[in-house]
Image (cartoon, rainbow, N blue to C red):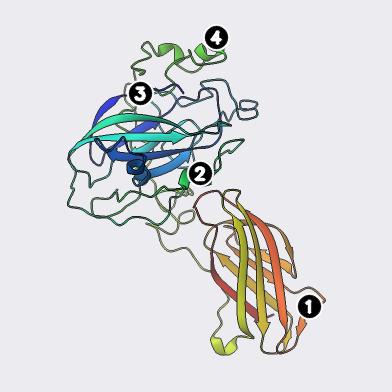
Amino acid sequence: WYQRRVREAVVSTQSTGVGWTSNNHAGGWVRIALAPYGQHKSHKAFDDNVMKISCYGHDQRPGGTVYGDCKHPCNARPGCEYQAYEEDNARFDTTVKIPHNLADGDYVLQIKSAMSSHPHFYYSCAKISVTGGNPSLTCPQDKLIVAPKCLKGTAVELKEYTKNSKPGKFCYNKDGPGYIDADMYRVPKNVQCDPRITCAVSIDGKGCKNQDRMKDITNDWKPEQVCGEVKPAPAPTCEDGVKNQGEERIDCGGPCAACPVTMPPTTPADRVYSKFDFQKIAYPSEGYLNGNAIVHVRHKVNGWNLTLFFDRKVEISQYWGGKLLSVNEFKTVYVFKNNSWNGRLGPGSKVTVGFEGKFDLGAVDSPNLMGKDFVQS
């Protein structure tokens, strides 16, 4: 594990780039945590103060990643460039915002990763000095640590990163909790730093030196590029067609208008069912979901539609007990209709619609059912 320990002075509310060397490996995740200096010798201090989980990275070029390996620098992002969008997360770096509610003083920023097929975690850290915060500002602790969908390959399961990990009580907005990636488009303070560091660790030293600006790194102990002016990326909006700034879905939810809910309007008096159960078996680390919707009918039905509304994207690949009638563009609302053999139902009868599907590896938990309905067609 090739690493450099550095010290950096930052102002609370600024963004800073965080990068790591590929070491010729690809796939998996990186956990980033921040703890006060003096508490940094305790694993628990970092476990209780997680900032985010990001992708470790992989070479996205054709043939660049094979069986969890790539040739360093593996198309990692060079100095003078930075991660400006959440989806651009496969280049061995990320951008983090220093919380508003930190007291002045020294902190240790830690990254934790098992990368590729390594069975154990490796750690690296940087000491940073923070000024200008507002420690009187308090923010609640989030319930979940959300992680992006990453190339897994043969890497350690995501659940091993989230086990014993808790989001820190960080305020990323001057008035409250905010969102760590909301200002990711802004140029980080240390944009000149080049996390690729050196070709000395590459299995293809000659090829490494021919990669973008690798020859310009003249000091392995202070790997930097001469940048000139680095212009920030366009600020995110609720109309840019990108899921960013803490949006629930593309351009809706979070700081944008609420996401539309396209559920058939019914009132309890209109309902043809007396009970609607939903059972699921989920494996969050694998992104697998098996579900069964069980409806107990109270009125005679001659043809029916069943609707399931999930809180995030689910890609249903197989289903039974009904036909798929429609699915919305976000793959969060699925409408099923009866088969020819189970469309006529009498009072007290029961109908079951089951499915198998995949969901993005993100939250610790699996998708939840936010809405459901069963109506006569």
Give the side of residue 9 with respect to residue 293, left or right. left
User: Badge 2, how many Cα within 10 Å: few under 14, some, many 20+?
Assistant: few
The disc at residue 206 is: 4
Secondary structure found at label 3: loop
Residue 320, image x, y percentages: 75, 66
Name the residue type under label 3: Cys
Q: Quadrant of the C terminus?
A: bottom right
Q: Earlier in the sequence, mark 3 or mark 4?
A: 3
The disc at residue 160 is: 2
The disc at residue 342 is: 1
User: Badge 3, how many Cα within 10 Å: few under 14, some, many 20+?
Assistant: many
Residue 135, image x, y percentages: 18, 48
Q: Is residue 103 above or below residue 256?
A: above
Q: Residue at x 27, y 26 (%)?
A: 7
Secondary structure found at label 1: loop
Secondary structure found at label 2: helix
Nearer the observer, disc 2 or disc 3? Answer: 2
Looking at the image, which residue sits at the far front?
A: 42
Q: Earlier in the sequence, mark 1 or mark 4?
A: 4
Looking at the image, which residue sits at the far right?
A: 341
Q: Identify the residue position indicated by label 3 in the image.
A: 193
Give the side of residue 317 with respect to residue 65, left or right. right
Name the residue type under label 2: Glu
Residue 75, image x, y percentages: 52, 25
Q: Residue at x 40, y 44 (%)?
A: 52
